[in-house]
Image (tube, helix red, strand yellow):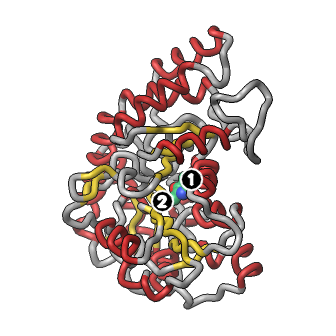
Amino acid sequence: MKKYQLAKPYIGAEEKEAVCSVLSSGVLSLGPITLKFEKQFAKRIGTRYACAVSSGTAGLHLALLAAGIGPGDEIITTPFSFIASANAILYTGASPVFVDVDSETGNIDTKKIEKRITRRTKAILVVHIFGHPAEMSDVMRIAKKHKLKVIEDACEALGAIHRDRNVGTFGESAVFAFYANKQITTGEGGMIVTNKKGIYRMCLSMRNQGRSSDMQWLEHERLGFNYRMDEMSAALGVTQLGRIHYILRERARIAQLYEKNLRPFQDYVIVPQTLKNNTRSWFVYTVRLKGNVSHRNAIIQRIGKMGISTKPYLPSIHLSEFYRKTFRYKSNMFPVSELVSASSIALPFYIGLTNSDIRYIVSKLILAIKSFQK
Ligand SMILES: *Cc1c(COP(=O)(O)O)cnc(C)c1O
C-alpha cells in the first residue's frame, strides 16, 4: 500500500551542501548567511528591510511589540488561523478580538470589522490564510479611517499577490514563517519585513536580548528575547529562496491537478477557490465536505487506514481548550469559522505528487465519503 503524508519539505543536494558549508565555517549564529538571507528575502518581497527570527511565532510577537502593542490594547484578528496568530497577541498583554471569516476564502470578513472596533483597538493582525490574500484594499481603508496599524500574518502566503502587489507589503510590517510544511523551510524560522527603519531596528534589538546594533558588547537597552535565527537555518533559507519560483509553480500545478480530478465530485466536496485580483500561493490543499459534516473525523480516519494522511484544517482558535477556558468562548460565536473548521479536510500536498497519486488520493477520499452516506 502506497503511503502519503500530509506535507513534505522540498530538500535537495544544494540544501545539504549549504548547511555543511556553514558547519565547516565555524560561524553558527549572527553571521553572514543570515544577513544574506535577509537581504535576498527583502528583495523578493519588495520591502526595504527584513529581520530573520527563530520562528514565525517569534516574528509575530516582535512585530506586535515593535508596533507598540501592549497590555490593555485590543487587536482585531480571525479565529480561523493557526493558534500562533492569536497567541502572539496574548504574549504582549493585549487581547485578540476575533472577527468571523468569509466562507469562500477563510479570510477576515471585512464587512464585520468595524462593528468590533472600540477605543482600545490599536491594530488589525490580518491573516492570509492558506496563502489566499485577504481583502487588503478594504482592510487598509478601514485601518486608515480608524487610525489602526496593520500587521500581516503572511506565514502561509509567501509569493501571494493581491491586486498586483506582493502580500507582505501592505501593513506596517509582515511576518513569514519557514516551518517544514511552509512553501520554503529553514527547519524552524521566520522573517519580519517592513519599510520602516524604526520597526526594523527595534526587531533586530529585541530578537537579540535587547541589544541595539550600535551598542557595546553585553549592553542591553530594553527587555529582549533570544529569537535569533541560526546560520544553518539561514543557509537552508537562502537555498530554498533560490528555488522559490520553481516551488511556487509546482505547488500551483499540483493544486490544479487536484482541482481537475475533483471536478466530477462537486456533489461531495467544495474545492478551494481563488478570488479575482489574487494570486494564491498554495500552502495546503483543503477541501470542504458538502452538506452533513458530522462524519468528517470518521472519514479522515478511514482514509488514514488506506495509507493517506489527511487532517482537519484548521480548528477554530476560540474553540481550543485554552481559549474556551480562559476567555469563555463558546460554539456559535463565530459560525462561519466553525463551519469551515468542521467541514475541512486537508489532503496530501507536496512537490513530487503525480497525477496518478492525486487520482488515487481523490478516489479514496470519495470512497470514504460515500461509505458514510446512507
Ligand atoms: C505557521 C504559522 C504561524 C507560525 O509559524 P511558526 O514558524 O510555526 O512559529 C503563524 N501563523 C500562521 C497562520 C501560520 O500558518
- SS for callout 1: helix
In the image, is 318 to the left or to the right of 250? right
Q: Earlier in the sequence, mark 1 or mark 2?
A: 1
Nearer to the camera, 211 or 238: 211
* Residue depicted at x 43% and y 77%: 146
Residue at which label 2 appears: 151
Vertical side of 194 occupied by 73: above or below: below
User: For residue 45, which numbered disc appears in the image?
Assistant: none
CA–CA distance in space, label 1 to label 2: 7 Å
Nearer to the camera, 172 or 371: 172
**Few, some or many residues within 10 Å of mark 1 (<14, 14–19, 20+):** many
Residue found farthest to the top: 24
Q: How many marks?
A: 2
Residue found farthest to the right: 218
Q: Position of residue 173 (x, y in %)?
A: 47, 52
Contact check, label 1 and label 2, Cβ < 8 Å:
yes
**Few, some or many residues within 10 Å of mark 2 (<14, 14–19, 20+):** many
- SS for callout 2: strand
Residue at which label 1 appears: 63
Callout 2, which amino acid? Ile
Question: Can residue 223 be seen here?
Answer: yes
